[in-house]
Amino acid sequence: MVNRLVGKSLFGLLVASAFAPLAQAADAPTLNTGSTAWMVTAAVLVLFMCLPGLALFYGGLVRAKNMLSLFTQCFGIAGLVGVLWVIYGYSMVVDTTGMVEGQVTFNSFVGGLSRAFLAGMTPESLVGDIPEGVFVTFQMTFAIITPALIAGAFAERMKFSAALWFMALWFTLVYAPVAHMVWGGSGALMHNWGVLDFAGGTAVHINAGVAALAACLILGKRKGYQNTPMPAHNLSLTMAGAAMLWVGWFGFNIGSGGGLNGTSGIVMLNTQLVRAPGFWAGCSPSGSRSASRAPWAWPAARWPVWWASPRRARMSASAVRWLSACCAGCSAT
């Protein structure tokens, strides 16, 4: 009887050991080609938002003589931040060394450098069910467009070399730490606080907005302001840029899910629906009591007058502002 039990035990161990590799293989993350294809597309869409979308949006609002300068700044930022991201930026954002869930340590504020120069990444490396190389590139596009957002604040007031120095320092000292605090996972400062940021409401838009305000206050007004006319030189370019931002924002928001799942449809719907109030908010005239009481009816009543007015610039800017506002909670149902 004892021998029979021992035999059964040995047989059970052999069967368990035979199927253990299969169970481990089932638990291990596997490449999802559908999600990978989407994340590649999303990364391209986010980069498209910056070049040429944001460059055209800002470029049409400045004077004609500064159009090329602003475009060059956006190109320069894309090249500079792309290199810094690979050298140390990615590591500062995603490295979790020294982090403890629920505790505040130095690494709750900024990641380490164990992933500098993308150390440890191989063609087989996966983040979720997509290749790590795709994840690195997608996050790089966020790192590129965030400082580019600031460029519109000091347009016409900063030299190209000074702008690049400012962006390099800001990316290192501000963007990478804040992105780590928000998206670093368990043990990161804002993760411990319970901050929800699905697609960059804090790490991208609030972060860039505060930096833009600070830059404006330090640099001061444009030379000749209030004495020299400074009209937007080409609103057609601005509206074309706003349209590119509109399309690219689907990659920005949906791609932040890291792939495709049931939440993707909700994010897509919320991203599209938020444009409507942004559009109409830009239509309504400033200081009009009737518009505040009935903002939806005013554009229809005075459509020809509105279309011929400078409010086209406000409409474009308003749509972009509302899109920025939806990033943090665009996955909400």
Image: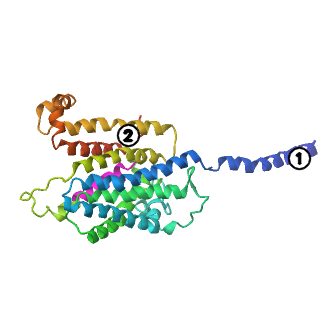
Residue 304 falls in which quadrant of the image? top left
SS under mark 2: helix
Image coordinates for residue 193, horizontal then vertical, percent: 39, 50
123 vs 10, left or right, is left
How packed is label 2: few (under 14 Cα within 10 Å), some, or many (20 or more)?
many
Q: Amino acid at mark 2?
A: Thr
Task: Name the residue rendered at 77%, 47% in the picture.
Answer: 19
> Can you say whether 321 is above or below 298 in the image?
below
Q: Nearer the viewer, mark 2 or mark 1?
A: 2
Q: How many marks?
A: 2
| Residue placed under numbered mark 2 in the picture | 271
- 236 drawn magenta: no
Magenta stretch in the rendered image: 199-213
306 or 147, nearer to the observer: 306
Q: Considering the image in quadrants, where does the C terminus appear?
A: top left
Colour scheme of the rendered structure? rainbow
Q: CA distance from mark 2 to mark 1?
A: 63 Å
Residue at x 25% of width, y 46% of height: 317
Residue that carries the numbered disc 1 in the rendered image: 6
x, y percent for residue 112: 46, 66
